[in-house]
Amino acid sequence: MKFTWFNLMPWPYLPDDFREKNRSVWVDIDQKLFDPVKSHEVYNTYLDLLEYAADVGFDAIGCNEHHQNGYGIMPSPNIIAAALSRRTKDVGLVVLGNSIALYNPPVRVAEEFAMLDCISGGRLIAGFPVGTSMDTNFCYGQIPALTREKYQEAHDLIIKAWTTREPFAFNGRYNKLRHVNIWPRPIQQPHPPIHIPGGGSVETYDFCIDNTYSYSYLSFSGYIRAKALMDGYWKRVAERGTPDASPYRAGFAQTICVADTDAEAEKLYKEHVDYFYNRCLHVYPGFADAPGYRTIKTIQTGALSQYAPPVGGYSTLTWKDLTEQGHVIAGSPETVRQRLEELAKTLNVGNLFCLMHVGNMPKEKCMYSTKLFAEKVMPKLRNVFPDYANDDRFWCHPISQVKAGNLPTEKKALEIVGAAR
Amino acid sequence: MQMTLELKTVKTHYAPVRYIEGGSGQPLVFLHGAGGAQANDPFLTRLAEKYHVYAPLLPGYGDSEECGEIRDMLDFTLHSWDVVEALGLKNPILVGHSMGGMIAAEMAAIAPHDVTRLGLICPAGLWLDDHPIPDLFATMPFEMPKLLFHDVEAGTQLLTAGLTLSDPKFLQTYLVNNARQLGMAGKILFPIPERGLSQRLYRIKAKTVIVWGDSDRLIPPVYAHGFKKGIAGSELVSIPEAGHMVTLEKTDQVIQALGRLG
């Protein structure tokens, strides 16, 4: 298994009465709740935690893109990834991802991802989400029924920009470019591995299968509820005559909290889990799914929006409900190991996006949980899929890494300049 | 005399188009709003007592197929002219409600010599920063009546009559229809229902009647002035105690107003 330490970067100061006083954490969230001065510390703590996860041995660290969102203060994941690329070495950088229909022109994504891959020495794992309806339609104004067509065109343009070695003209419906010739281009060839977040549409299954992209289900409702959706994916993989059903063809996001014992986990993390599920996921239902955003076929399959809360809402879910139903995997290292093994095997998922920072969790608790996971859980799950141990098609391929901060001393520099002049 | 309207199909270049037809008299093409139209629509039924009514459904509406080739305002406008031609009509009275009014105005602007009588019933298509139109696409179904009706209670009855929202099967059908219909409407209405019509209004040569409900809370009556100012010689009929669904709330008065077109 590959473990990515993921931080959604929630704003940790949503008030206790947030649900009562606000209609949504997303799109039209109250401007006054964001404090730029406090954010200075929040951002730097979150970056520190991501770097800490790299230090304790996670395979990758990850970030994503949301807009006007109280639980994700990362409208530009590339800025976060750029900061991380300088202070880490060897660890994978998962940017999951850039909502490519929103970049105008999308060659911007080809360029920025290429820069990230070059700065990090081939450590980029690139994600191309369509973006949620909140982000793509309601915040960034894309027409719902045309979003997927625009996404597809952006994808084709980016791949062509990455793989074509001479300037070309691109006459798309949404992009008319006479001279596409990105400079720089990525280290990884033919291009960095690509992960596609999806929510159960057959079109996205096929897109991943046809292009050898990893399909990621980024849900907050846990692995038990994800079974039907992932079964649908694997069924499609089989139907399409795909040469293998490698677990690395799939990724899954899971909230995880580790402590010494199950009881300690509840004691330490309950309030932060509650903060996340009851404040951070308080999305106004009118923003969940702009008509036309999801295809008719997808709605007909009965797949609910990822952001549709469970019947009755999250607030009725107790710690026991959340952990037993798998929304959250929490407990002693052994409990967490068992449940993650069950997750890996029932979903056949090789890429695990570990949501280890939850809601308003303070950095100390987050470090504690992260360290326990890295030391006592990760090693025991490394070889859950021995048959696919060498499947590196969906992972980054770093080159020999240059250390950041590698300038000579001023004295040494003067000596060399002296010898040259 | 109670008219019976029929649902029929006509072929056009991009898609087979479903249309509601009935009545006798001068041919009148009615373009529906974002909510669509049905053969038992009380407004169309009354209209058909006086005119030969043709009410084409946009692709994706009712039981019709979606059409991926219709993407932007020009596509909508030309498609609607294709429908008029496919129906074998020349210079029909052209009437549109809300989104349909926006399309009708565009049709009259792009082909000013082909339309001599134009009825715009609280049309979309303009935008005033000081009077933002509510976001239809982020509005929950239960919030709709207060945007659409003067008499909210009666409007709610009208919208939910015969619906069983607790039935999951019904809900799924509802979601599919909503996605298909509003998905199509979103191509010209999302996120802001304005596609440059204001700079084309001057081209309209038709005799034009603009009809507006005084208590329209979806597209407030202040928008009527933009249309009146933009279309030379147009006439505004304001109807008291009526909301955006003025066609349902004050059916007779709307039909009377359209009568001014001759």
Image (cartoon, rainbow, N blue to C red):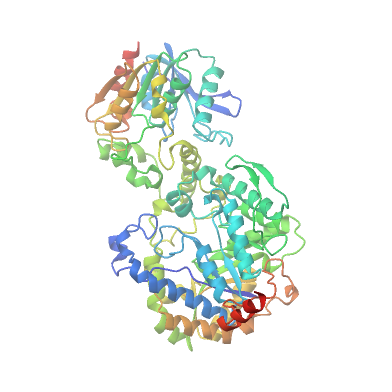
Task: Tell me: residue A94, above or below residue A198.
Answer: below
Question: Can you say which quadrant of the picture contains the N terminus of chain A?
Answer: bottom right
Residue A219 makes an appearance in the image: no
Residue A102 screen position, x and y as percent: 52, 51
Left or right side of B84 for A69: left
Please tell me whether residue B39 is drawn above or below residue A280 in the rendered image.
Answer: above
> Is A99 above or below relative to A178?
below
Task: Report which quarter residue B71 is drawn in.
Answer: top right
Residue A67, visible in the rendered structure? yes
Question: A384 and A301: which one is in front?
Answer: A384
In the picture as drawn, the residue positioned furthest to the left comes out as B240
Q: Is residue A334 above or below residue B211?
A: below
- Image quadrant in which you'd find residue A26: bottom left
Q: Position of residue B4 (x, y in %)?
A: 43, 21
Which residue is found at the position 49% from the left and 43% from the top? A143
- Position of A226 with respect to A238 (left or right) is left
Q: Between residue A245 and residue B227, name the one nearer to us.
A: B227
Q: Position of residue B247 (x, y in %)?
A: 33, 27
x, y percentage for residue A325? 49, 72
Is A401 displayed left or right of A131 in the figure?
right
Q: Quadrant of the C terminus of chain A?
A: bottom right
Residue at x 72%, y 62% (from the top left corner) = A189
Instruction: Name the foreground residue: A95 vs A232.
Output: A95
